[in-house]
Image (cartoon, grey):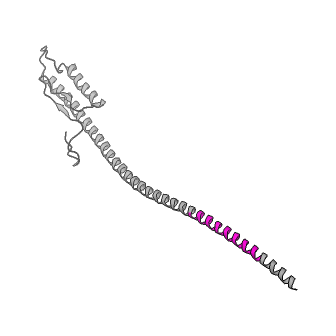
Amino acid sequence: MSNTGQGSRTGSLCEIMFEENPTSRYLTRSTCPEESQETNTATSNVLGLQETLGHGPGDNSSEASPTANDFSANSTSVQHHLVSLKKQTSRQKAEYEAKITSLEQRTKELQSEIKDLHSKLGQQRKWYSLVEIKMRNAERAREDAERRNEMLQREMEEFFDTFGELTNDVKKTEQKLFKVFKSIN
């Protein structure tokens, strides 16, 4: 069955095939790969009705010739079941199409969400890279500061050693001068 109600769908999920039977014109098979329980039940009902009335598929008995009333009653009953099956099929088709539409919408929403998550992930990776660079720079700056402090400490030690030697030399010189002044006086 084709869907004329929606432009986006050109075929249905399940098509029911009708075959002409020499003894009756009933639903004989479905091309739907997975028949629903309801369709199986309705098909069984129609076939059961055929057998009850003595006109089932494969019934070649010639016990009694059916009367016009029998054909009329059978035809009306079969038509009723056929209409029921068509309604059931239409309802199932509408349900399936609604489910498909819902799933397609959910798929679009999920794809949009995935796109947003990929974007956020890219931003997080950039941010993480920047943080790593800043951490490496901070570590290098700390190492450089430690080296400068060590050099400054050595220079200060050298300065104080040199200053101490100068101070000692000055003191020795002062003592010598003081002795010289004392001896002159």
At x 67% / y 71%, what residue is drawn? 159
Q: Main secondary structure of the magenta part?
A: helix
The image quadrant where one finds the N terminus is top left
How many labels, in total?
A: 0
Residue furthest bottom in the image: 185
| Left or right: residue 102 compared with residue 180 | left
Task: Inspect the magenta stretch and tell me whether residue 168 lies in it.
Answer: yes
Which percent across, then down, holds residue 135? 52, 59
Specify the quadrant of the image occupied by residue 9: top left
Q: Nearer the viewer, residue 122 or 49?
A: 122
| Left or right: residue 82 compared with residue 138 | left
Stretch of the chain drawn in magenta:
144-171
Q: Nearer the viewer, residue 108 or 119?
A: 119
Which percent across, then down, holds residue 143? 57, 61
Q: Nearer the viewer, residue 34 or 16?
A: 34
At x 26% / y 35%, what residue is drawn? 88
Specify the quadrant of the image occupied by residue 142: bottom right
Which percent across, then down, holds residue 48? 24, 22
Which percent across, then down, holds residue 14? 23, 36
Residue furthest front in the image: 184
